[in-house]
Image (cartoon, helix red, strand yellow):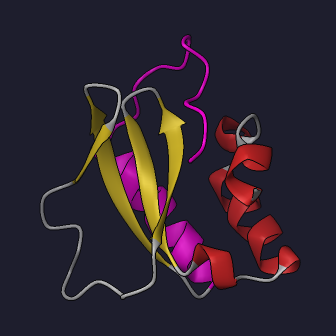
Amino acid sequence: MSAPPAENETSISDAELHRLSAAVEAVAPVRAVPARITGGRRWQSLPHSTGGDLPISPPTRIPISTDAGLVMYGFHQLTAVQRERVFAALGPRCEEMRNDVEQ
């Protein structure tokens, strides 16, 4: 499991989470579900964000701020090049926890 982002990270809007989810899905064969992090550990998908059945593969949690992130299905099957595309789509917000996610 990855470490949470730095404490000074500000919240991200639901619209921005949906935009990041679509950006990730456009560059890699993953399912990215936007989620809110509550109580520091519980991840809850945004309403109407799953859009049907979820894959069977184990999810990878990618925190974007202290209270939001993406739950990705299929991340561990990606090549190194595909993972780079995912992190590029997410931008500098996720740079700090990149090494934690890839372990």
Image: 42 above or below 81? above
Viewed as shown, does residue 95 lie left or right of 7?
A: right
Percent of width and height locating residue 79: 81, 83
Viewed as shown, does residue 49 lie left or right of 5?
A: left
Image: 68 above or below 73? above
Looking at the image, which residue sits at the far left? 47
Is-magenta flag for residue 64? no
Image: 99 above or below 7? below
Percent of width and height locating residue 8: 56, 11
Is-magenta flag for residue 8? yes
Query: Within the image, what quadrant is residue 94 found in?
Result: top right
**Foreground residue, 31 or 10?**
31
- Total numbered labels: 0
Percent of width and height locating residue 101: 68, 53
Q: Which residue does the image show at 58% across and 81% down from the upper left?
A: 26
Q: Which residue does the image show at 54% across and 19% down from the upper left?
A: 9
Percent of width and height locating residue 1: 56, 48
Q: Which residue does the image show at 61% across and 74% down from the upper left?
A: 75
Viewed as shown, does residue 40 lie left or right of 89?
A: left
**Foreground residue, 89 or 50?**
50
Looking at the image, which residue sits at the far top? 8
Q: Quadrant of the C terminus?
A: bottom right
Q: Which residue does the image show at 29% across and 83% down from the upper left?
A: 54
Query: Within the image, what quadrant is residue 57 found in?
Result: bottom left
The magenta-colored residue range is: 1-28
